[in-house]
């Protein structure tokens, strides 16, 4: 499936530029939640694994926070395979369903810490909100930590 979108931008010289962006579904990455097409606006990252440690272009984002970066990368990989548009529509939370993005942030967090339906798939935003959740709830906020499934990536 290929999505197309025309985007208008202003260049550094003040010129109006129109670009057509074509987005193709990659692997089995979900592009829907509850039968609603979601906008995909990132370049997919192919993680590499060395031993049990996963390296991605998101390392610089994850490592800028005061937490164990290696552990959080393992948790995020177990949660989403580090796919920014990962959606688990079956996750049930208090009054809503769904977990979203690299950190698989539950729907109950939308509207908090600046997270909304327009920016949840942005890696910077998703990881920043994950850090806020970590400060409030600790590692037990992630099911893969509680059940130990992150350990194969740690």
Image (spheres, rainbow, N blue to C red):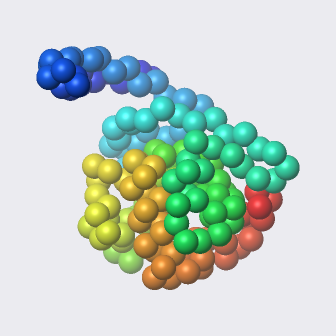
Q: Is residue 62 above or below residue 113?
A: above
User: In the image, is 62 to the left or to the right of 112?
Assistant: right
Q: Relative to the observer, which residue lies in front, 124 or 28?
A: 124
Q: Relative to the observer, which residue lies in front, 55 or 63?
A: 63
Residue 89 position by quadrant = bottom left
Residue 152 position by quadrant = bottom right
Q: Is residue 46 above or below residue 119?
A: above
Q: Relative to the observer, which residue lies in front, 91 or 17?
A: 17
| Label total for image | 0
User: What x and y, as percent, mark residue 4?
Assistant: 32, 21
User: What x and y, as percent, mark residue 134?
Assistant: 51, 75
Residue drawn at point x = 76 percent, y = 53 percent: 53
Residue 11 position by quadrant = top left
Whether residue 96 is visible, yes or no, is no
Q: Quadrant of the N terminus?
A: top left
User: What x and y, as percent, mark residue 22?
Assistant: 38, 20
User: In the image, is 28 to the left or to the right of 147?
Assistant: left
């Amino acid at each position: 499936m290929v999505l197309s979108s025309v985007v208008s931008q202003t260049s550094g010289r003040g010129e109006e530029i129109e670009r057509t962006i074509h987005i193709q579904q990659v692997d089995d990455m979900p592009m829907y939640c509850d039968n609603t097409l979601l906008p995909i606006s990132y370049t997919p990252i192919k993680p590499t694994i060395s031993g049990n440690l996963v390296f991605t272009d998101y390392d610089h984002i994850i490592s800028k926070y005061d937490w164990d970066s290696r552990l959080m990368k393992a948790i995020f990989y177990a949660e989403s395979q580090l796919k920014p548009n990962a959606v688990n529509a079956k996750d049930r939370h208090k009054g809503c369903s769904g977990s979203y993005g690299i950190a698989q942030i539950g729907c109950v967090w939308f509207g908090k810490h600046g997270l909304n339906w327009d920016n949840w798939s942005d890696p910077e935003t998703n990881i920043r909100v994950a850090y806020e959740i970590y400060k409030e709830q600790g590692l037990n906020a992630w099911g893969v930590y509680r059940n130990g499934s992150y350990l194969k990536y740690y």
